[in-house]
Every structure is written in structure tokens, then in C-alpha cells.
Amino acid sequence: MSEAPTFSGFWLKIRTAGLLLAWLAMLGWAQVRGKIEGHVTDAAGNALDKVAVVILSQRTSAKIELSTGKEGQFIQIGLEPGFYQVTLNKPGFVSRSVEIKVNIDETSKFEVKLEAVEAAVERALSDADRLFVKGNKLYAESKYAEAAAAYQDAVKLNGIQWAYHFNLGLAHKKLGQAAEAQAAFAKAEELNPSSYGANKELAESFGRAGQLEEAKKYYLKAVELSPDEPDALYNLGLVQAATGESAAAQASFEKCIALKPDYAEAYYQLGTVEIGLNKVTDAVGNLEKFLTLAPGHEKAPIARQLLEVLKK
């Protein structure tokens, strides 16, 4: 006759099961986040240790601080997908800021070389870095006017850091200063043409100003730099539709939906574009999908009216 499990054995099983569930939860958490792995050297390729690394989310302004090890490497896990500014700073070297995209369950690797500087130049650059950090802190606290002032002072000391101009543009944008924001984003894009963030923000600023051809130019570049960003594809589709490029707009909205199947507004815009292309059946399907996803949306009454006409 088998023995009944002891009370302590019972709780051991419960605790083991709890640990297993916790482990599974952590595994799931890890699989929806990504990792950055960097390697920092001097101009000759020698590894630089004790480089201060600041990782700043472009979406949330959340900041992580760490430093490189003896081999000049650093690793940061648990990052939400999106774009990050990674700023590298070490006494005796010119600081650098790079834009890194983090994807789900992937490692974003990059290498950066830091250039040595003379002491006098370093003092000015260090002051600029301190102002930049100050601006980031103020921005995170929603003190946008003070942040803009700090970024402007940083730019005066070091005008070749694209991130200074980019963050200045973000502060101006928050303050509703459209012209100033556009000028800052334009300078950031000039200094770092491969920045997705600079191209997207510059495109958005042109779009808000009604300069649609310029907006389209930079949205196209943003999509080229990062083809899997649904918001950029959606905005590109809006501009293409507004400039009479219906077929191109249709393609952009379809790509947007393929990346984000619950993007309600994209179904609405796709449906309206398809009406103009005389694709009635497709238009009906997409407008109905829009209403399923967002029945209370401000455009829902228009969608219902369109469907009534299309189904007659």
C-alpha cells in the first residue's frame, strides 16, 4: 500500500510548480523584449573600458546607465522593442551618440570608435554632455522649456552631435514650436542621415506644415531605413493619398496592416482609397473591419454611411 504524500512534500510540489510558473512567465517576458550589445574602441581599434553608456528610449525617455568592461563591451537585456539613443562618454575622447533599433527576441549589435581629444577641447565637450544629460532629465520630467534651453546651450558648445539637435526638436515639438522643431530635426537628419527618428520626425513636421512633397520624401526614407514600422507606413500612405498616389497609398496601408493587423485607422484609410480605385468589394471588407476594431471611432459614422452607399 503506497504512502500518502507528506504535508511537507505537498508544499514542496506547490512551491516547485510556483517556481516553474514564474520561470515560464520570465521566459515569456524575455521573448517580447530585445537586447543591445555594444563594443567600443579607440581609433586604432583598442578596446576601451569604463566608457559611460547611457541608453535612452526615444519613445518613453526611460534611461539606463552602465559602462563597458575590460574588452570594451557592454550588454543590456530586457529592452522593449523600439528605437534607442545610445550615448558613449569617456574622459579624453569625443562622446558619441548612435541610434539603435531593438527588435523582439533579437540582439542588436554595434561597434563604435571614439576619437581622442585635447584637454581644452574635452572640457568644452564635457560641458556640452552635461547640458545634454540635464536636458534629458528635464524632458523626462515634462519640463520642456527648461529642457530646450539646456539642449540649446549644449548645441552652442558642440554643434556636431546629432542627438543634441534631435532632442532639441522633440522639446520644441512638445512646446508647439513647429518651425523651431523642424529646423532642429533637419539639422539632426543632416548630421545623421541614417537616423530613422530624425527622418520620421522631419517628415511629420513637413506634413503638419502642409508641405506634402517634402513630408513624402522623408517618410519614404524612414520606411527605407526601417521597413517594419507600421506608423511610418501609415503616415506615408496618408501623404501618398493626399498627393493623388492612390495605388502607392494602397500598398503602404496594406503593408501597415500586415505588420499590425489591429491598426484600425489603416483599414479605414485603405477602404477609402479603394473606393477611389473602384475596388468596391475590398473597400467594403476593410471598412467593416475598421468598424469591428473601432466602433466608437470618430470616423465610424462616415464609415457606416460609406458602407450604406457601397452596398446599394
Image (cartoon, rainbow, N blue to C red):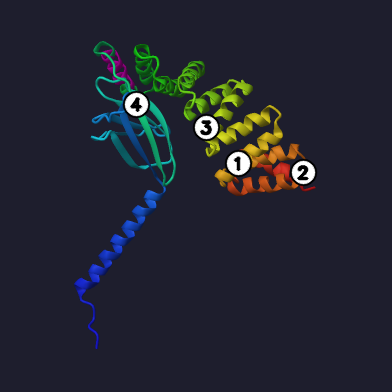
Q: Which residue appears farthest toward the front when viewing the image?
A: 44
From the top left corner, tell me how far across and down residue 123 is, in percent.
26, 14
If you read the primary sequence from the N terminus, does the residue marked by circle 2 or circle 3 appear first?
Answer: 3
Residue appearing at x 70%, y 31% in the figure: 245
Secondary structure under tag 3 reads: helix
Q: Are marks 2 and 3 in contact (CB under 8 Å)?
A: no
User: Closer to the camera, 98 or 309?
Assistant: 98
Q: Which residue appears farthest toward the right when viewing the image?
A: 312
Judging by the rendered image, the residue that carries numbered circle 1 is 255
- Give the image quarter of residue 8: bottom left
Residue kind at label 1, given as amino acid type: Lys
Residue appearing at x 27%, y 65% in the figure: 16
From the top left corner, tell me how far across and down residue 43 is, in percent.
32, 23
Residue kind at label 3, given as amino acid type: Leu
Secondary structure under tag 1 reads: helix
From the top left corner, tell me how far across and down residue 40 is, in percent.
31, 30
Judging by the rendered image, the residue that carries numbered circle 3 is 225
Foreground label between 4 and 3:
4
Residue kind at label 2, given as amino acid type: Val
Judging by the rendered image, the residue that carries numbered circle 4 is 113
Question: How far is mark 4 from mark 3, CA to CA?
Answer: 22 Å
If you read the primary sequence from the N terminus, does the residue marked by circle 1 or circle 3 appear first?
Answer: 3
User: Closer to the camera, 220 or 240?
Assistant: 220
Q: Residues within 10 Å of mark 1 (few under 14, many from 20)?
A: many
- Is 194 situated left or right of 267 in this image? left
Question: How far is mark 2 from mark 4, CA to CA?
Answer: 62 Å
If you read the primary sequence from the N terminus, does the residue marked by circle 4 or circle 3 appear first?
Answer: 4
Residue kind at label 4, given as amino acid type: Lys
